[in-house]
Each structure stands twice: as structure tokens, then as C-alpha cells.
Image (cartoon, rainbow, N blue to C red):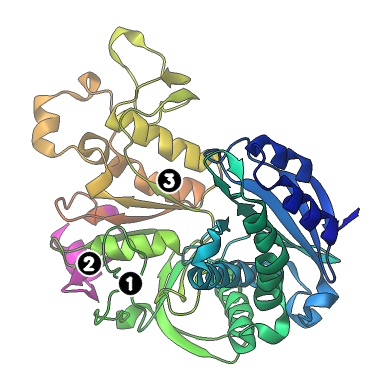
Amino acid sequence: MKQAHTLFQTLQSLDGQKYGAYKRLAGTYAYDNFQLAIDHIQADPYAPPSKVRIIINKITTGIPEDLIDTKLKRIAVSDFLTRNIYSKIHKLTQRQRNYHANIMIDSCGPEILERSAVTITDNNIEVCLEIGLPATGRKILGKTATHIFNTQVPQIVEQALSYKHLNQAALAEQVTLMEDQHYIREFLVQQGYIAFVANDSILPRQSGVSQQPLRHAVTFTSPTAFEVALTLPSGKRLIGMAIPEGITLIVGGGYHGKSTLLEALQRGVYPHIVGDGREYVITRDDAMKIRAEDGRSIAQVNIQPFIDNLPGNKDTSQFTTPNASGSTSQAANVIEALEAQSSVLLIDEDTSATNFMIRDDRMQQLIAPEKEPITPFAHKVKPLYDDYRVSTILIVGGSGDYFEVADHVLMMDEYVLQDVTAEAHEIA
């Protein structure tokens, strides 16, 4: 292993040379309290950035062992460190614009995920960065590169990985939240629920392309019949809606918040950070969102339970097509979810193929069953639960065909959820 000063000397000597000379930097270098591995060097200034790793001993960072002594905690801490490094890099490069530093790490959404950008092993913490090695035209800027590796990288390590410089309360809060969310997820399975939404959760987002919570939004309130109270491992007490296993319809007029609730539930398979508004929207982690995907490829999927007797006696037990229709794609998505052992299907009529979802009495009178190859999902949703214990949460606003098979019917009225199961069954 080479010493860090060797790297700095090499960079100084490369100043003004052709860009390809950067290849000489490959290797691992020892700094005072960490190692830097330069794994891949970009071929020219316009190629994808070079890839480096920071390797630092866990003890050196000072992060307490009780924050990283389980896999769950390590995921929470590595996610926190990734966000912290991203923030520090942004601040650092804003202050030192003259050095053209192009240091990058994966940015994070609101979900707490097991990340490859920062990994915590038994002995070390490894950070994967991308660095755009500086150049003017195709000539190396050796002095600028030296500043990146001699000053900026050590600053990132010190400010973003050293426990004394971290927001220690926020780090502990994220670890505690992760454990609380895991407890709720286990509670759902043990008690026969498929999802939980805490009261006062903020479900709407600022826009269709943003994951930031909407300011001044109507917060969630559970229908009384679905309310449960939970005491979490942290001691926090939650009250919210627990959706039981079975077939649950969420109905209501357009723009009243049905799809917003479903989107929160589909993202609830992942834990979320503090401040997202959906920290305590928890769905079983094997739930799948099902939709039509016109044009998708299908390879040897048995969609016969939904689509059979195609013209020309085409076999649907091993259905294959490079360009599926809406109905065949949605049928394949359901079957693939079942093959993946999903216990919860999440479906929104807005993103579904109408002929896959329903076929009303009048159409059945006009088109005889033997002439229609599609068995609508409305005829299969009940057997899916009765025979295979696969629950369904379904957003509907234009058809009452599912009322008679629904176990629970909830109505979203101006962003407020109400239990209308009795009314729906009476209509059915």
C-alpha cells in the first residue's frame, strides 16, 4: 500500500500532461486515519467519473457499537451517513467553487434502504464516491486534483464520518425509528393485518414529481372501526388505521385522495426517514403494486387463469409476447406477483386495463362467455384470498362490481377516510 503523499506527488507531476496519464493513480493509499482506494479511472474528462472508496475503521469514526450491533441498525446508520456525506459534499463544493471539485455520492429519497454507497462491515466503514478528475480541455489539472485528494477528501471524512461531528441525536432517532417501523411490520403479520397508517400522517406530496410532503395538507385520520393503538419499543404510542387481511376497496370521487393513499401504502413496504410524513405508514414488505403495462415483454408466463381461449387456439399456459396489451400485461403482473409469493396486491383502476378489471351484465349478454377470452379480476379476487390468502387493496371510483366481494369498503371524502362497508353491502 502506498502512502498518501505519494499520490499528491504524482498528481503534481502530472500537471499539464495528457488526460490518460491519470491511469497511473490506480491503487490504494494510506492517509493518517483512513485508506483511499482508487478503483477505476475515467478514460477522458467527458467519460463517467472515476470511482474511489474510502475505507475507515469503525473504531476510528467513534460511532458507538450499540448503534451498529444489528443488521437493522447498520442499515439505518449507513443510510444516515450517505445522506450526511451528500450534504457535506454539497456544502464543501459550494464554498470552494474555484477548485472545480466534482465529488459525488448517490442521493437518497425518503426511504431508508440498504445502500451500497456506504457499507458497514464487522471492522470497517466503506464509502463509495465518484470523482470527476479535473482537466482543462484534455490536459490534467494536477494542482486542482491535488487539492481534491489532499484537502477535500479528508474534510469529507472528518466532517461526515466522525461521530463527534455528526448530529448524534438525529442519528439515534433514525436508528430508533427503524426499529419501531420493523416492530409495526412484524405486528401486522402476527395480528392478521396488511397495512397500518398512523393518525396525523401526511400523505400528499408537493407535486407528482416530488417526494416532499405537502405543506398545510389534511392529515390522515383513521375510521373508528379500523383504529388500533400500538406501543412501540421506543415507548412511543401510536393510534391509526390497521387494514385487515381480505379484500379492501377504497372508493370516492376524483381528486379526493384515493390514489394518494394507495401510493403511500405501496411505498410503505420501505421504512421512511423522520419528517417524510409517512414514517408510520407501514405495509407488509411482500406487497406488490399491480398495473397494466402496455408494450412490456412477457416470457413463458401462465396467464390462463385470466386469459384463455384466444383466437387461433393460442396457448396461454406459457404465454410469450414482446409487446403485451394492457390486459395481458396486467394478467402477467398478477401471476408474477403470486410466483414471488406476494401476500398483498395493490391495484388502482386509473392504471389498470378496464377489460381486465370488470365486465358488466350488459356486455356479458352481448358477448357470450365462450367468445370472451378474459376472465375479469372481479371474478378472481375472492378466490385469490379464499384459496391462497392473497389480500387485495383496490382503488375504484367508476364501478360497483366489487362491492359484493369486498370485505371492507372505505370512502375517501375530501381527504377524510370513512367506513362505508355496510352501505356498500346493502347496495350490492
Between disc 2 and disc 3, whose residue precedes?
2
Q: Is residue 286 above or below residue 237?
A: above
Between disc 1 and disc 3, whose residue precedes?
1
Q: Identify residue type, mark 2.
A: Gly
Nearer to the camera, 3 or 55: 3
Q: Identify residue type, mark 3.
A: Leu
- Do the residues bearing badges 1 and 2 touch, measured as CB atoms within 8 Å? yes
Between disc 1 and disc 2, whose residue precedes?
1
Q: CA distance from mark 1 to mark 3?
A: 29 Å
Q: Could you tell whether 14 is left or right of 286 in the image?
A: right
Tell me if residue 382 can be seen: yes
**Identity of the residue drawn at 83% across and 60% down:** 4
Q: Could you tell whether 132 is left or right of 146 in the image?
A: left
For label 1, count other residues whose C-alpha is less than 10 Å away and answer few (under 14), some (14-19) or many (20+).
many
- Do the residues bearing badges 1 and 3 touch, measured as CB atoms within 8 Å? no
Please state which of the two labelled residues, at mark 2 or mark 3, is closer to the viewer: 2
For label 3, count other residues whose C-alpha is less than 10 Å away and answer few (under 14), some (14-19) or many (20+).
some
Q: Which range of residues does the magenta coloring cover?
A: 405-428
Look at mark 2 in the image and give the residue it sits on.
257
Q: Position of residue 108 (x, y in %)?
A: 51, 62
For label 2, count other residues whose C-alpha is less than 10 Å away and answer few (under 14), some (14-19) or many (20+).
many
Q: CA distance from mark 1 to mark 2?
A: 9 Å
Q: Which mark is residue 384?
A: 3
Q: Looking at this rendering, what residue extends furthest in the top direction? A: 312
Q: Is residue 366 above or below residue 314?
A: below
**Identity of the residue drawn at 22% across and 23% down:** 372
Look at mark 1 in the image and give the residue it sits on.
203
Q: Quick one: SS at disc 3? A: helix
